[in-house]
Amino acid sequence: MKKFIALALAALMTTAVFASCSNNGNTTAKKEKITFVLDWTPNTNHTGLYVAEEKGYFDEAGLEVDIVQPPEDGAEALVGSGKAQFCITFQDSMIPAITGKNAMPIEAVAAVLQHNTSGIISRKGEGMDRPKGLEGKKYATWDLPIEKATLKQVVEDDKGDFGKVELIPSTVTDEVSALKSKSVDAIWIFYGWAGIAAEQAKLDTDYFAFKDINPVFDYYTPVIAGNSDWMKENPDTAKNFLSAVKKGYEFAVEKPDEAADILCKAAPELDKKLVKASQKFMSKEYKAEVEQWGYIDPTRWNAFYNWINENKLCEDKLSENLGFTNDYLEK
């Protein structure tokens, strides 16, 4: 009888082991759910996310990530309210979310690009290759305080008169068409997408980058931001997420052509030729000169917010190191 019982127990244990193996990665390996909100339609700012999804980096980290489009009131609102854990945003545009009586628990946790690639594009040979050249020209404005203060500073630093720049409401959805039609003379763009689009269209342009005019404008744009409260409660999950994202962007650095294919697979409506060219440009910008993908330099972050304070562009004074942390990055 004892021998029979022993054999029966052994059989049951063997069955349990096989059952456990057959369920591995399913019910026994429940994944943490993450909602990630984009800032816009998919583009090469987001490639690392789609690579992480396609290559299984999220899966390996025990995560199920849902990448969603932003609502009308912006990605920050979803993250700040706790309805999403992470989003894409920008150091300048996140200021309203982290200040005032209604400040939300949101902070930047990784720099997507190491440097600000934005600047002013115009038709070539019309004198707008430098800020002073904007005098008497039509600039398409979003009518945002930080935007106009930035433009005013670079024009005046170049001994120009900002009052002579003709500000017209921006209705630009296609920078190339707007410049070709001469409905506008100058447009604020991010070169990695709109600048590359102009190159692809064989449009001769002039361009100056804000960071080349004044280093204070080499702020972080875009960044990945997370819900501060959630991250404090779930630090390991936050770190695992950013580790997987890091792998995605580093893959895009090493293999931009393959990364472009992955982005186009996720968003087939994109112009593949543009994505390929943009990805080649962006592959040099994701990490640039730093060793650690995502690192945010406190000196540069604070320099820009100090400029905001000096120009009284925010009702509340922005304190040192407000709105970012490197604590969740993989060392």
Image: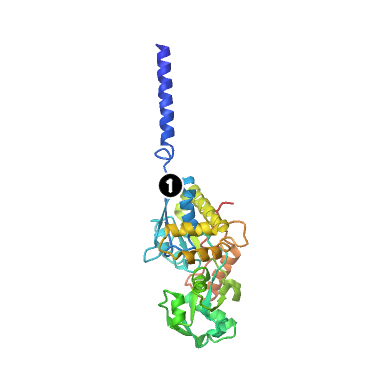
Q: Residue at x 41, y 22 (%)?
A: 11
Q: Position of residue 149 (x, y in %)?
A: 51, 78
Q: Residue 92: give x, y in percent of width and height.
A: 49, 69
Total marks drawn? Answer: 1
Could you say which is closer to the camera, residue 304 or residue 118? 118
Report the residue that reaches farthest toward the left: 72
Would you call the spot at circle 1 few (<14 residues within 10 Å), some (14-19), or many (20 or more)? some
Residue 228 lies, in percent from the top left, at: 47, 56
Query: Which residue is at 46% across, 59% downward?
Result: 263
**Where 7 falls versus 259 (above or below)?**
above
- Secondary element under disc 1, as helix, strand or loop, is strand
Residue 294 is at least partly visible in this image:
no
Quadrant assignment for the N terminus: top left
Direction top: furthest residue: 1
Between 75 and 262, the one lying in front of the other is: 262
- Image coloring type: rainbow
Nearer to me, 122 or 28: 122
Q: State which quadrant residue 21 falls in.
A: top left
Residue 161, quarter of picture = bottom right
- Residue type, numbered disc 1: Glu
The residue pinned by badge 1 equals 32
Q: Position of residue 202 (x, y in %)?
A: 51, 75
Which residue is depicted at the point 41% across and 61% down? Answer: 268
> Is residue 325 depicted above or below 141 in this figure?
above
Res 142 → quadrant: bottom left
Q: Is residue 246 visible?
A: yes
Q: Residue at x 42, y 12 (%)?
A: 2
